[in-house]
Image (spheres, rainbow, N blue to C red):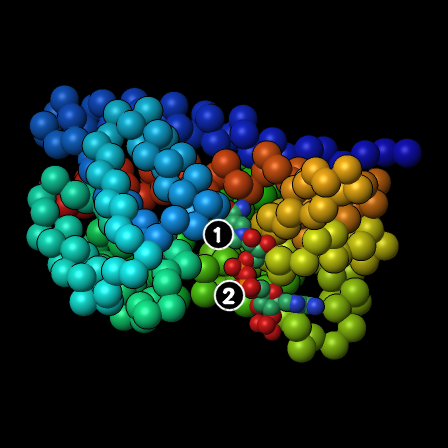
Amino acid sequence: MTRAQLIDGKVIALELRKKIREETAALIKQHDVKPGLAVVLVGEDPASSVYVRNKGIATKKAGMESFTHQLPADTSERDLLQLVAQLNQDASVHGILVQLPLPKQIDTDKVLQAIDPDKDVDGFHPINAGRLMTGQPGHVPCTPKGCVMLAKSVLPDLTGLEAVVVGRSNIVGKPVAQLLLNENCTVTIAHSRTKDLASVIQRADLLIAAVGLPEFIRGDWIKPGACIIDVGINRIDLEDSKTRLVGDVAFNEAVAVAGSITPVPGGVGPMTIAMLLVNTLDAAKRQIR
Ligand code: NDP
C-alpha cells in the first residue's frame, strides 16, 4: 500500500526560525532596532500558560525582546484596555498578542479592536481582516499563514486547485480560505450546516481541516492523492488514563489515500509560533519605515 508523503512542520518551522533569527540580527545591526513582542495572559489556564511560555522562549531564541504580562483572572476589562493602550504607545514593543480565551468579564472583541493594527501580530483586528480580504498589506493570522506554507512545501503552485476548508472561524477557516483564494485556488468553505460533507471533501485536491473534532474526517472521504493539512488539535483519553493528541482527520486511514499529509502533533502546530515571529519581525521593519 502506498503511503502519503509526510509534511514535517517541525523541520519547516525550524528552517523558517533560523531565517528569522538571521534577519533579526541584520535588523539590529543595520537599524539598531530589536523587535519586541509583548504577550498578555489573563488568568492561569494551563494550556494558555504553556503557549505563552513557549512564545516567550521562541521570541528570545530568535534574538527578539520578549515582554510577558501575567494578569490575575479577575482583571477588569478597563485594566486590560489600559495595558493595551500603554503597549500601543511603547516604542520598544512592535507586536502585541493577547492570549485567548479571555475570562468572561472581558469583551474579547473590544480588547482585540483596541490593539494598534500595525502591532496586531495575531492578525485578528478587523482592520487586518479587511486588509486580507481586499489584498492590502497587513498582518495575516499565524495558523492560516502556516497552513499555506506547508501546502506550498509539497505543491509550490496552488493555482487552479480545488481547495476545501472545513471550518469557518475568524482565526483559522475564513483567513485560510482567503489566502487560498489569493493563491488562485477554487475555494469551498464547509461548516456544521454543510450537506453531504463527505462528497464536498471528495472534490478537494487540497483539504484544510479546522473543525475541532477528533479524527472526524475519514479516509474514504478523501480524494486519492490529495494534500491534507490538519489544523485540529484534540486531546483524547486512552484506557490507561493517559491522553493522546489527534487531529481532525483519521490519520491512519487518510495516509493510505492522500498524496501528502501533516501529522498531529508536528504539523501545523510548530508553524503557528514560527509565523508569529515572522509577523513580529515584519511589524518591527514596518515601524522603522
Ligand atoms: P472553532 O470551534 O472556532 O470552529 C470550528 C469550525 O468547525 C466551525 O466553523 C464549525 O462550523 C465547524 N464544524 C463543527 N462541527 C462540524 C461538523 N460536524 N461538520 C463540519 N464542520 C463542523 O475552532 P477553531 O477554528 O478555533 O479551531 C479548529 C481546530 O483547530 C481546533 O481543534 C483547534 O484546537 C485547532 N487549532 C489549532 C491551531 C494550531 O496552532 N495548530 C491554532 C488554532 C486552532 P459552524 O461555524 O457551523 O459552527
Please determine whether, in this image, residue 80 is positioned above or below residue 152.
below
- Label 1 crowd (10 A; few <14 / some 14-19 / many >=20): many
Label 2 SS: loop
In-front residue for pair 29/42: 42
Q: Is residue 80 visible?
A: yes
In-front residue for pair 7/185: 7
**x 63%, y 50%: residue:** 234
Residue 85 lies, in percent from the top left, at 13, 59
Q: CA distance from mark 2 to mark 1?
A: 11 Å
Disc number placed over residue 7 in the picture, else none? none
Q: Amino acid at mark 2?
A: Ser
Does 191 sit left or right of 179 as displayed?
right
Which part of the image, by quadrant, shows the C terminus? Answer: top left
Of tags 2 and 1, the one toward the viewer is 2
The quadrant of the rendered image in which ligand 1 is seen is bottom right
Q: Do the numbered discs 2 and 1 sit on residues whose CB atoms are within 8 Å?
A: no
Q: Write down the residue under mark 1.
A: 144
Does 89 sit left or right of 231 as displayed?
left
The quarter holding residue 73 reads bottom left
**x 48%, y 31%: residue:** 13
Q: Is mark 2 within 8 Å of ligand 1?
A: yes
**x 78%, y 73%: residue:** 196
- Label 2 crowd (10 A; few <14 / some 14-19 / many >=20): few
Q: Amino acid at mark 1?
A: Pro
Does 22 sit left or right of 285 as displayed?
right
Residue 147 lies, in percent from the top left, at 53, 47
Residue 175 lies, in percent from the top left, at 46, 60
Q: Write down the residue under mark 2.
A: 169
**x 64%, y 47%: residue:** 235
- The tag earlier along the polypeptide, 2 or 1, is 1
Residue 75 lies, in percent from the top left, at 25, 60
Please determine whether, in this image, residue 175 is positioned above or below residue 206.
below
